[in-house]
Amino acid sequence: MISTADFKTGMTIELENKLYEIISFQHAKLGRGGAYVKTKLKELKSGYVSDKTFRAGEKVNQAILEEKKMEYLYREDALFYFMDVVNYEQLTVSKAELREVAKYLKENLLIDALMHKGSLVGMKLPLFVELTVTETEPGLRGDRVSGGSKPATLETGSVLQVPLFVNKGDLVRVNTRTGEYVERV
């Protein structure tokens, strides 16, 4: 059990048999009333973000997550296969469980699987991944770096906006937190 005074951004807590990550928190006190802590919580299973207010000093259960280094092997229909790099056990995860993570998975990519009491609750990708552009409109002569942008389909099937000079077959670096183009590699 931890107090609201111990809250930190990124900490995982357990409320009503669900796991939540603390995205942000703010301590406040109004006039004669008691102090309180406003938090923004992200449910780990669904990804749903909600606001919750706690009384100052209220106790909650802290969830301890284990990080396992996993390697993405391959995809078969809506199932994704991963292998633990330490003991070589395989883990099968559905696309629904992966949510946004599936857009950036490339074979042999190393990720951190977040486990709680033996079950998967989430995955952490590297900050940047390098993906090949499989489809985009050709750039026009005279296109510059500071110009506009166009949609491009990546090898994983995701679509993002890239500068006009990026062509089919180019390798691009993508920020996995924001989903934005960073640079051509």
Image (cartoon, helix red, strand yellow):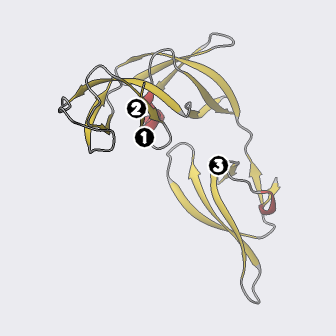
Which residue is painted at 40% across and 24% down in the image?
131
Q: How far apart are marks 1 and 2 (CA)?
A: 9 Å
Q: How far apart are marks 2 and 3 (CA)?
A: 29 Å
Q: Mark 2 points at which residue?
A: 103
Mark 2 is surrounded, within 10 Å at the Cα level, by few (under 14), some (14 to 19) or many (20 or more) other residues, namely some
Q: Mark 3 points at which residue?
A: 17
Q: Which of marks 1 and 2 is in front?
A: 1
Mark 3 is surrounded, within 10 Å at the Cα level, by few (under 14), some (14 to 19) or many (20 or more) other residues, namely few
Q: In this view, does 39 lie to the left or right of 78?
A: right
Q: Distance between the residues labelled 3 and 1?
A: 31 Å
User: Which amino acid type is marked by label 2?
Assistant: Lys
SS type, badge 2: helix
SS type, badge 3: loop
Residue 117 in sight: no
Give the quarter of the figure containing the C terminus.
top left
Q: Name the residue under label 1.
A: 179
Decide which of 54, 28 is in the foreground and name it: 28
Which residue is painted at 68% across and 67% down in the image?
26
Residues marked 1 and 2 touching at CB (< 8 Å): yes
Q: Which of marks 1 and 2 is nearer the N terminus?
A: 2
Q: Which of marks 3 and 1 is nearer the N terminus?
A: 3
User: Which amino acid type is marked by label 1?
Assistant: Gly
Which residue is painted at 55% across and 34% down in the image?
127
Furthest toward the top, the residue is 88
